[in-house]
Image (spheres, helix red, strand yellow):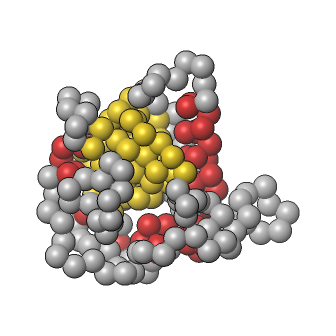
Amino acid sequence: MWLDASDNDIPSPTAGTAAGSTGPVCGVHCGTERWEVKTLSDPDTGRIHGDTVDASVEDLVALERPNQLSASGRADPVEVTIYRVKARLVWFVGEKDGDYHLVLASLPDPAIQMIAEVPNPGCTGSCASGRSELYARVRQTLMDHLDSPQSEAAPVVRVTGVGFFDYLHGQRGVAPNGIELHPVIKVEFP
């Protein structure tokens, strides 16, 4: 099931973190490296194209990695593009920074892998982006499906997220070019 009504853009920020809200409690310091870009709280978020591009894991791992990455700016055109990928979810874990780390494998060749991450909705970057509730819903959808008795060991998943190049530091499932979908803004188990 898609997590918001629109299939063509990043959901608008919502309040939802004010006192009395049922949304996530915000303001915890979590990640560091390119954190604003990872959580959509960077100044370039408004440049992200509204149309979703269907791509395969193979397509994304073949993209050219930029020579330099800005700590708080986006690398055109990849980091201003929303991608939707159908893949096999071969690994899932909560990281020290609170993100949900997903390893996505190509359907035809499971040796070709990349990472997708869902930010911790309580972190300062998530709060600043106004999308804490979105991240909480995506995470809940993952947990609901993966905790289900019907869930397969490595289910097929459709993940929509913003293109992102991470620093290469030996992450499990990292693509050779460091491409990720970060943040994940929609998830579906077809």
Q: Quadrant of residue 44?
A: bottom left
Point out the image quarter for the C terminus.
top left
Residue 23: image location, x then y, percent: 73, 57
User: In the displayed structure, does residue 55 sit left or right of residue 87?
Assistant: left
Above or below 73: residue 12: above
- The picture places residue 85, in percent across and down from the top left corner, at 32, 42
Residue 47 vs residue 63, the one in the foreground: 63
119 relative to 114, above or below: below
Q: Is residue 113 visible?
A: yes
Q: Is residue 146 left or right of residue 176?
A: right
Residue 98: where, in percent of width, then height? 58, 59
Seen at 20% across and 29% down, the residue is 108
- Closer to the camera in the image, 126 or 113: 113
Quadrant hosting residue 68: bottom left
Residue 163 appears in view: no
User: Which residue is found at the position 66% from the left and 64% from the top?
Assistant: 122
Q: Report the residue that reaches farthest toward the right.
A: 20
As drawn, which residue projects farthest toward the front? 170
Q: Residue furthest top?
A: 150
Residue 9, placed above or below residue 190: below
Q: How many marks?
A: 0
> Residue 174: image x %, image y %?
30, 53
12 displayed left or right of 54: right
Residue at coordinates 56% horizontally, 30% vertically from top-left? 145
Residue shown at 55%/18% (left/top)? 150
Left or right of 128: which side holds 182? left
